Amino acid sequence: MGANYLEQLIAEWYEYKGYFVRRNILVGKRVKGGYECELDIVAFNPETGHLVQIEPSMDADSWNVRERRYKKKFDAGRRYIFEILKGLNLPSEIEQIAVLVFASKANHGNLGGGKIVLVDEMLAEIFQELRDKHLSNSAIPEHMTVLRSFQFVAEYKKAVFNALNKEA
C-alpha cells in the first residue's frame, strides 16, 4: 500500500470501477536530473474510454498557492499523459480532478483548470455503491485494503454508528 492514504483510496476506487490505474508518475525529465513534476493518479477505463487525472491533497494552502500547483500538474498531465499511455485508444480529452480535504466550493468550482471534488463527495459516492455490496456475496478484492475496510464499515454500520454515538 502507498504511503499516501488519500491517493491509495482513490486509486483503489478507480481500479474497482474497472480503470487501469497508474500512480506517482514522474514526468518531464530534466537534462540535469530530476523531473518537472509528478502526476499522482492517471486512470483509463477501456470500456467507456474515460481518461482521468486525479490530484488529491490534504493541504491547507491558500487558493493562490493551490492554483499555481494544480495548474502546473494539470498542464503537465495534458502534455505527458498521452505519451505515458501510448498504444492505447485514448480519447482526446482528459478529465482533471483536484480532490481536496480542507476546502469549500462556495467560491471555487475549479482549480488549475480541473474540477474540484471534495473528499466528502467522494466518500458519499463510494459508500453509496458499497451499501448493497455484502461481504458474503460481493467482497471487495483483498488487495484493495482501504475499500475493503470501507465495505466492513458499510456492512456493520449499526455497530460502528453506535460506537461513534456513545457518550465518553
Image (tube, rainbow, N blue to C red):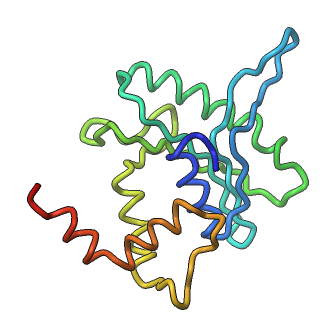
Vertical arrangement, residue 68 with respect to residue 97, above or below: above
Image location of residue 35, percent across then percent down: 76, 21
Residue closest to the far left: 167
In the picture, measured across the screen, residue 124 lies left or right of residue 19, that is left
Vertical arrangement, residue 101 with respect to residue 63, above or below: below
In the picture, measured across the screen, residue 156 lies left or right of residue 82, that is left
Image location of residue 158, percent across then percent down: 25, 77
In the picture, measured across the screen, residue 64 lies left or right of residue 1, that is left
Residue closest to the far front: 168
Where does the C terminus fall, quadrant-wise?
bottom left
Residue closest to the far right: 87
Image location of residue 88, percent across then percent down: 85, 58
Q: What residue is drawn where x is 53% and y is 24%?
A: 69
Image location of residue 8, percent across then percent down: 58, 50
Q: What residue is drawn where x is 52% and y is 36%?
A: 113
Vertical arrangement, residue 138 with respect to residue 140, above or below: below
Q: Nearer the viewer, residue 47 or 159?
A: 159
Q: What residue is drawn where x is 60% and y is 61%?
A: 14
Image quadrant in which you'd find residue 154? bottom left
In the picture, measured across the screen, residue 4 lies left or right of residue 141, that is left
Residue closest to the far bottom: 137
Image quadrant in which you'd find residue 100? top left
Numbered-mark total: 0
